């Protein structure tokens, strides 16, 4: 299989040319085509000789993602079904909010975790996305944002398909490209990686001194409940998760966001509220209450507004910042937990 030329660094490219007896600056030219001009065909690299283009074609391919289908929601959200070089599909979403645009990006094809309330968990994990596929989603949405909303993307959240931390290496490489000058030049402060709570990898991220933000999908601070709704979490007990979050804060000084959905008869009682407050008090944190988006699992029903208000008042009483995240793009199944390649069915 030929290598994707975009997996080469500038240095790698220059050495490739040198070792084939061409001047090293050709590396800069090709790099410029690939990263500054988003060029996805060797034939469009017009300042590279025909002969040299053939040399490149012999050894390399450019596996750029392709948009297979675009759906636009009445609230302005745009969902892209994206085809990968091996014909697998992922989804990525453009979310316009006031004068900002957030890109919601996938990290894996399908997901290996088993959160019962999430539509993506119904698709088994097929493979990890490579760094370029991660970058391409952001850059595609950036182009769309300029086209439809006259502005570049301002924020990126890894809340699409998959568990980003289980694709750690490629996630970091993809983010490096997104934040680099020749990529999109987006500050890591505007990027949030959301994890279902893989404690040991939160520790690894803290050790690697990453600069982006961390969100943890908590949904319950009571072990028994969490194990029921997110069965994989038996392997990642809450005390270990809390230790990891404490370590994250100690190393990065960044406040974690807990994502939390409130469901009828699952976590809508005072015990769950108190447990969340205690959990949040243990290390600096804020809470994002997410509106539940219905999936096919009848077991999960969004709690009444009254309960949400109870959560908010208890958190606020304890000086824990809390926000409500209204769902976007529901009419096209583009909201959190609804990404399941529906248009395929
Ligand atoms: N695997 C990572 C990232 C993808 S999910 C994680 O779990 O964090 C992004 C967010 O959507 C998570 O907080 C997840 O818990 C939430 N989510 C999943 N299903 C949902 C649903 N049906 N409605 C609302 N949010 C959901």
Image (cartoon, grey):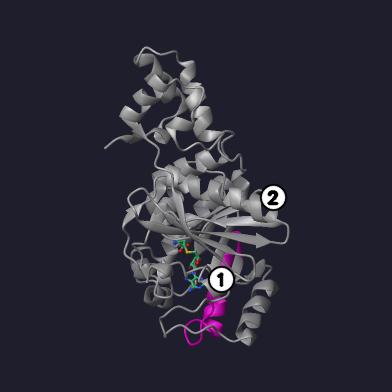
Residue 36's image quarter?
top right
Residue 75, percent from left and from top: 64, 69
Q: Residue sitting at 54 percent across and 55 percent down?
A: 214
Closer to us: 21 or 328:
21
- Residue 279 in view of the camera: no
Q: Secondary structure at mark 1?
A: helix
Is 33 rendered above or below residue 19? below
**Labelled disc at residue 278:** 1
Residue 211's image quarter?
top right
Lower sequence index among marks 1 and 2: 2
**Labelled disc at residue 151:** 2
Q: Is residue 281 shown in magenta?
A: yes
In the picture provided, is 123 more to the left or to the right than 161? Answer: left
Closer to us: 296 or 189:
296
- CA gap between label 1 and label 2 equals 41 Å
Q: Determine crowd level at label 1: few under 14, some 14-19, many 20+ residues with C-alpha closer than 10 A.
A: some
In the picture provided, is 56 more to the left or to the right than 331? Answer: left
Is 133 rendered above or below residue 238? above
Q: Is residue 271 shown in magenta?
A: yes
Closer to us: 57 or 169:
57
- Residue 72 in view of the camera: yes
- The boundaries of the magenta stretch are 260-286
């Amino acid at each position: 299989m030929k290598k994707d030329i975009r997996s080469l660094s500038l240095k790698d490219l220059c050495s490739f040319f040198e070792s084939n007896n061409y001047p090293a600056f050709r590396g800069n030219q090709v790099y410029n085509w690939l990263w500054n001009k988003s060029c996805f065909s060797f034939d469009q690299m017009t300042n590279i000789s025909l002969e040299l283009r053939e040399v490149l074609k012999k050894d390399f391919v450019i596996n750029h993602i392709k948009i297979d289908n675009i759906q636009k929601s009445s609230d302005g959200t745009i969902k892209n079904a994206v085809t990968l070089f091996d014909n697998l599909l992922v989804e990525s979403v453009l979310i316009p909010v006031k004068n900002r645009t957030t890109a919601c990006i996938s990290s894996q094809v399908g997901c290996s975790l088993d959160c019962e309330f999430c539509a993506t968990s119904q698709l088994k994990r097929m493979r990890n996305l490579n760094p370029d596929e991660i970058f391409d989603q952001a850059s595609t949405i950036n182009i769309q944002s300029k086209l439809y909303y006259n502005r570049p993307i301002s924020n990126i959240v890894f809340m699409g398909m998959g568990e980003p931390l289980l694709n750690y290496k490629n996630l970091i490489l993809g983010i490096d490209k997104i934040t680099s000058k020749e990529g999109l030049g987006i500050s890591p402060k505007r990027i949030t990686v959301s994890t279902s709570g893989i404690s040991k990898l939160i520790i690894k991220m803290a050790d690697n001194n990453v600069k982006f933000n961390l969100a943890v999908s908590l949904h319950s601070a009571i072990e028994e409940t969490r194990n029921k709704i997110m069965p994989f979490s038996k392997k990642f007990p809450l005390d270990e998760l809390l230790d990891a979050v404490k370590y994250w804060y100690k190393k990065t000084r960044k406040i974690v966001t807990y994502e939390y959905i409130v469901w009828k008869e699952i976590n809508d009682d005072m015990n769950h509220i108190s447990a969340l407050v205690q959990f949040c008090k243990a290390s600096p944190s804020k809470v994002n209450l997410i509106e539940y988006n219905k999936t096919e699992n009848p077991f999960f029903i969004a709690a009444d507004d009254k309960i949400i208000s109870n959560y908010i008042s208890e958190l606020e009483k304890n000086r824990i910042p809390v926000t409500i995240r209204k769902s976007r793009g529901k009419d096209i199944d583009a909201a959190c937990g609804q990404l399941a390649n529906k248009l395929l069915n």
